[in-house]
Amino acid sequence: MVRSTSGGPPSPPSVASRPVKLDEAPPIRVLLKANFGSVPVEGSDVDSLRLLQAIGGKIRLADGKGRVLRSGSGFRLQARKGRLLKLDGVAYEGVLEVFVNPLGSSVIVNELSLETYLKGVVPNELSPKGSSQFEALKALTIAARTFAFSALGQNASRGFDLYTDTRSQVYRGAGSERLLSNQAIEQTRGTLATYRNQAIVAFYSSTCGGVTADYQEAFQRPGIPYLKGGAQCPDHASPYSSWEELIPVSRFQRDLDRVAGVGRLKKLESLQKSRWGRTVEMRFVGDQGEKVLRGLAIRSALGLRSTWISGLEAHYDSSGYITEIHATGRGWGHGVGLCQTGTVELSKQGWSYEKILKHYYTGITLGSSLVGPPVQQVPDKGKLLVAILGPTSSGKSRLAFTAAQALNGEIVNCDSQQMYRLLEIGTAKPTLKQRGEIPHHLYDLLDPDQYFSAGRYMVEARKVCQEIREGGKIPFVVGGTGLYLRALLEGVFEGPGRSQEIRERLKRIGEGKGFDYLYRLLERRDPAAAARIQPGDKVRILRGLEIYLLTGRPISQLQQQRDPLKHLLILKIGLRLPRPILYDRINGRVGEMFRSGLIEEVQQLLAKGYRSDCKGFQALGYRHVVAVLAGELSQEEAIEKTRIETRRYAKRQMTWFRREKEVHWIEGPGEDAPALESLLKLVEKHHGIRSRHRP
């Protein structure tokens, strides 16, 4: 074991606030093995157990001669008294749970307490040889504890990096314990890093190359205030502060296909860099199309060491295809949050662990109790946001326009299809004349083949709403995409990324046994989520099961970890029409879309090179026009199918919006004068704001 050369580490400085109570923290579950055929186990409470075998969808416990002791779908194995469980010769504290998961994979999980878990996680390669570095080890310990606490149940075998590189932060069992690491764990026991009374998500990387990155910039997900980026690390402390590589395309073509899907690479174009010089956005052009990638997706597609690219030169063959790239850059890993090597260097300079942590995680508190209600942020009176919701064809856009005129407001789009440029006729966007009279935001934001998530909408819409309020005006958020509205107002949870492997396996199960089978499986694993998901909603069923299989936790639990919109007063106004009237309006709009040239619009987009299966063409009406152009439907059939599916969509919208809380419903279409009058009265009644045109 590594020991201090000065007779032991110094006593920890006192922490002003009391330690965090972790009594209710559930145990940590660490994935040790998956898809195993057989594996040796020692020290179990099951007599004579020597081997675990996965055969025919069952787990068998066998003795040294292979004779079956027990057989079933799963077991929990305790250690014998005075011994540790060993799996493949590696010792583990706690319990080993062995089972066959819903995908039919054999899985072994180690379940143990949080503090015991830390003993196998705190980076042992940084266990210092002298007390001058002990403050760094304590900072790393608190970051590790905080991450584990805030992300309990996640697949801890992936470590604390979101990137799949697991050089140093992987749980390594009881054998990885070190004397000074254990002392750091004990001296900081119960201490978490918190922000606004919530445990932070304490990402840290081995090196950052001098300046940490912004979380939103690196991961293209909603920003985290305490990971705003820009924390300085001593450059000379990073052994990877600069790098240079010559990479043949053949080395990363498989990742390029998975991430970008543009085929053989013909061009790379850097579109945007952060203020620190990291590449934030890059265009990939290939023989099968082009795509703009952001953040870590760039690194993943090209197999680079980081996204801090200082130079990129492409080499071409005689046909104009890129054969290799010569890349130079700075940093290693994502470099978000605390930097290990920078932490050690700052500790050598005499920094305390508190100062180090607050340097990397801006505005945090150490040791604040998580027990009790969170601090309530009271918004200033008058900081109003009006959300206008309702089914398609109910007149939301018209009501928002007239209300913005009357109340000195600006309009923020909350319709996922109206964000696509070039898709005009089928999305019923506000007219150019209307957009010229009143500022409209988040329209024509994307190309038809680009993907846009609810998380990204939350970031963009919150930014726009804040800017509108700072300008002294009222944001009117209008649209029928309920998921986007909920993301804006309530936040999105930080779930794991997509796993294409799990998704494909679930799809195969659904195709073989039917999606009803997958829905019943979700009902067993996460009844709360299943109750909110329609049995025919394949996308959300797959996502619910995917998250459960990745984290071991129901999505309904994770969704409680949201960051709601603060500092604004929310007034929700809904439009509700009798069903026959709404359906007549839908039928009329669909007919007008086709008469106005929807088929010609799609033809022009296809001529521009957009594929018939691109994201924008999934919108109502557009996919049916694609079928017309492919000879699969007549125009009359396409019109009727669009009407039917739009009516069904309106019904689903109302089902969603009826679950929204505190909605003030207005009976009738949005363009009628009584609708505007009702809205103005609600604004005046609840928030004291009067129309410029009312006495």
Image (cartoon, grey):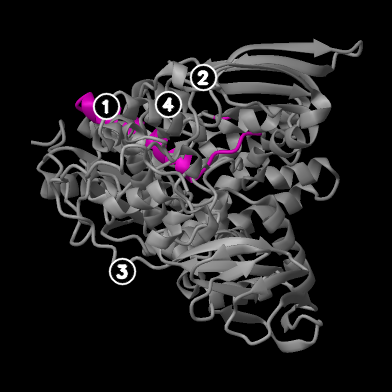
Residue 47 position, x and y percent, is 64, 87
Q: CA distance from mark 2 to mark 1?
A: 30 Å
* Label whose residue precedes the other's in the sequence (4 or 3): 3
Looking at this rendering, what residue extends furthest in the right direction?
318
Q: Quadrant of residue 323?
A: top right
Q: Residues within 10 Å of mark 3 (few under 14, many from 20)?
A: few
Amino acid type, mark 2: Arg
Q: Quickly name the residue at label 4.
A: 212
Mark 3 to mark 1 CA distance (whole Å) = 35 Å
Circle nearer the viewer, 2 or 1: 1
Residue 243 position by quadrant? top right
> Looking at this view, is 22 or 410 the one in front?
22
Q: Which mark is residue 24?
A: 3
Q: Earlier in the sequence, mark 3 or mark 1?
A: 3
Residue stretch in magenta: 446-472
Residue 455 magenta-drawn?
Answer: yes
Q: Could you give the CA–CA distance between mark 1 and mark 4, rounded to whole angstroms?
A: 21 Å
Asked if the residue at tag 1 contacts the one at tag 3, i.e. Cβ–Cβ closer than 8 Å, the answer is no
The kind of residue on which mark 3 rests is Glu
**Residue 585: horizontal and vertical position, in percent?**
50, 52
Q: Give the vertical position of 428 relative to 636 (above or below).
A: above
Q: State the separation of the CA atoms marked 2 and 3.
A: 41 Å
Query: Label 1 near label 2: C-beta < 8 Å?
Result: no
The first of marks 1 and 4 along the sequence is 4
Quick one: quadrant of the C terminus?
top left
Q: Which residue is mark 2?
A: 278
Q: Amino acid at mark 4?
A: Thr
